[in-house]
Amino acid sequence: MAQSIAKEFTKGLWAEIPPFRLVLGLCPTLAVTKSVENGIGMGIATTFVLVFSNLLISLLRNVIPSKVRIACYIVIIATFVTIVELLMQAYTYELFLKLGIFIPLIVVNCIVLGRAEAFAGKNTPILSVADGLGMGIGFTLALASLGTVREILGNGTLTIWGGTPIFEMGANFMPFKFMIEAPGAFIGLGLMLCMMNLIGKK
Amino acid sequence: MREMISMIVVLTVFTAVSGGLLAAVKSKTELRIENQVLKFQKAPAIKDLFPEATNDPLAERFTIKSGDIELQIFPGKLADGSKTVAFETRGTGFGGAVGLMIGINLDSDEIVGARVTTHSETPGIGARAKDDPSFVSQFAGMSLDTNFAVKGDGGDIDAMSGATVTSKAVCVAAAQAKKLYQSLKPEILKQIK
């Protein structure tokens, strides 16, 4: 049992890391990773939704009629997304302003619905929470790494919570401004996918 | 038949529980969110409008009720002794409500300035109304007789190029502010003394 929990948890961290391996949830991946901070914030919000929606869906999997399961999943997911949105407004307003419309859009993030449909609807609550947590942390790591690459190349800095950069490129560094614009998101993601495939090649 | 009933019952129960839960979270966070909006949206706008206020407009804020409208008023005393008030009105832009904090001089009925507060306009397009104050700064010094509509609609306001919907929303908010101010001025004067 403990072994399978560990297996479900770790698969989301590398073997099935959402944006890079499953290539799911690209909308927030591309849109919010202008900086590490945004990436981590978005990742944590998504992790919260994933864990709780997986838990609830798994607990209720025998009650939900299969014909309306997608509607039930969406109601559960949307509830948690709205809770996250309200909590972020109440406690981390500055981050909420930066992420803006992408918080409510977690509802249509295919990772969340994908895990509900492919995993939580068929497995026990403990395994589902492990799966949600693993996938969420994997998603956070992916967003943070893409955000790191884009912020360093595009702005020459690395900032985590609180305005002052923890890392700065030398004065001679000319930032590639396009990396923090929309095209930079696609190029950055493409390079990351390429790296992942190179490393994972057997 | 049994299946159909179970589907209806399950969905009804889910949506009802979800609605109840959200109402509970909303009522618990409402006050905090209001304070956050005050701190991060309204306070900077008011500071921009009355940079030299001799009082603290945030601390001295009060609410006026007129019919079913509740209006939060921020009174500002300027260095030259003139009295001003700021309050927020809304117009509907491209992505939802656009809040406009507008400052009006009580003595001359002139607009001191205007700033966009909460909005969900497109970054780089409609959001310029907030990020780049050159659009809203044209309101400063205008009298309330101004026709608050974009020039394309026969008004006196220069719209931002490429962001007509947002410009119109700001104008609607300004026109709303004018209406509210004119009807509530006696009430405001009573409160300020």
Image (cartoon, rainbow, N blue to C red):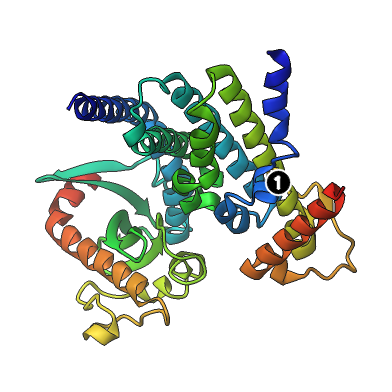
Outermost residue on the left side: it is B67
Identify whether B55 is placed above or below A87: below
- The quadrant of the image that shows the N terminus of chain A is top right
Circle 1 is placed at which residue position? A142
- Asked which secondary structure carries label 1, the reply is helix
- Amino acid at the residue labelled 1: Ala
Closer-to-camera residue (A118/B14)? A118
Residue B24: x and y, percent? Answer: 33, 25
Closer-to-camera residue (B153/A22)? A22
Q: Dot 1, how many residues are within 10 Å of its Cα: few (below 14), some (14-19), or many (20+)?
A: many
Residue A3: x and y, percent? Answer: 73, 17
Identify whether B86 is placed above or below A127: below
Closer-to-camera residue (B56/A202)? A202
Within the image, what quadrant is residue B60 found in? top left
Q: Chain of mark 1?
A: A
Identify whether B156 is placed above or below A158: below
